[in-house]
Image (spheres, grey):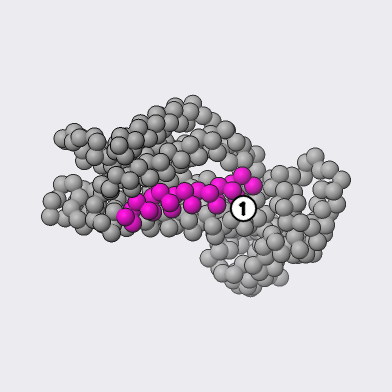
Amino acid sequence: MIEQFDFLVRLVAIGASLMLLALLVEGEMRANLRVSLVGLVVGAVGYLINSTPLIGSAGWVDPWVDLVSLSPPFWIWLFARQLFEREAPRRAVLAAVAGLIGAWFFGNFLPGAAIAGFYAIHLISLALIADLVRVALSDHADDLVEKRRIIRLVLPLLVAAQASGILIYEIVTADAIAVPWVQLVNAVLILILILFAGTALLRTDEELLLETQAEASAVATPEPIHLNPSEKVLHEKLSTAIEGGVYRTTGLTIAALAADLDTPEHRLRALINRRLGYRNFSAFLNRHRIAEAREKLVEKQSVDLPVLTIAMDLGYNSLATFNRAFRSETGTTPTDYRRLGLTETAAQN
């Protein structure tokens, strides 16, 4: 009875996945999100088919279905990273792909290494999920988009309940086919994830899925628009604090800034996000910090000032963090920017 109900839930989940896939193809979301979400949906369908004992062997097709079915942890990790605007390092992406494909090859084509491939796939998948949870939760306070802040809390819980639970179960039992009731719970959780994706992510929400004007024009500083009287007062207080150099405070959080401005945190979040156009508090700080850094780097009186000193004076806790932020804003390193700026100044004189 449990097996039949599990099979029915899987059929519903596969149907929902195919509908989701159709909407993705026709949707207007950002290209990188579309690719990773399509990969996730296809991988989920492959897993639903591959992980039930009610579907018999298909011979030579089995290894390829197995390859598709092991990919969901990778795709959901990549999708979450892109959704949260914390792009995965290229080396990490390539390492994950190489590791999963290599483990799949060992598991399917080298009988003596099958168990090693099995454990490698599960350990890599768990590492990706752990990183997803870390990024989602560690950057929650920095995120200014309210709907995305909710997803940062809900998505890790769903992923941890479904993917981590079944992966750990399979590692402990050394069996990819669980007992019927575990398979049923797994199928239900997958269906919930698919429905969550459909309801929370496929409403063509500009804040979540589309390229915003601020993203399309990263050089121009967003200007406040349509401020009501209370927002104007808060914006004036914020501008005064920025002019006073509050952005140079090391470890400054939006909660601390809200307390300094004597305003509720949610009001400050709404102002910076919905009126000024910033999606992350760190981006707001970086815009002001990097603007001052560009001035200091080409000042003649600061020519001997080490880049590290400039970074620390602006509130960065390390040179590497400053370099990443500077390159993101300007497309070059602080050292190269200083060299080119001083060279141009000397040529003009």
Task: Describe the element under mark 1 as helix, strand or loop.
Answer: loop
In this rendering, does residue 130 appear at all?
A: yes
Q: Quadrant of residue 261?
A: bottom right
From the viewer's perspective, is 104 left or right of 187? left
Residue 8: image location, x then y, percent = 35, 32
Q: Alpha-carbon neighbours of circle 1 within 10 Å: few (<14), some, or many (≥20)?
A: many
Considering depth in this image, is 161 or 93 the residue closer to the camera?
Answer: 161
From the viewer's perspective, is 328 left or right of 36? right
Residue beneath the point at 45% across and 41% down:
193
Considering depth in this image, is 4 or 332 the residue closer to the camera?
Answer: 4
Q: Which residue is mark 1?
A: 143
Residue 321: image location, x then y, percent = 55, 64
Q: Is residue 18 above or below residue 296?
A: above
Which quarter of the image is occupied by the C terminus?
Answer: bottom right
Magenta segment includes 151: yes
User: What amino acid is labelled 1 in the image?
Assistant: Asp
Residue beneath the point at 55% across and 47% down:
151
Q: Is residue 199 above or below residue 160?
A: above
* Main secondary-structure element of the magenta-colored stretch: helix
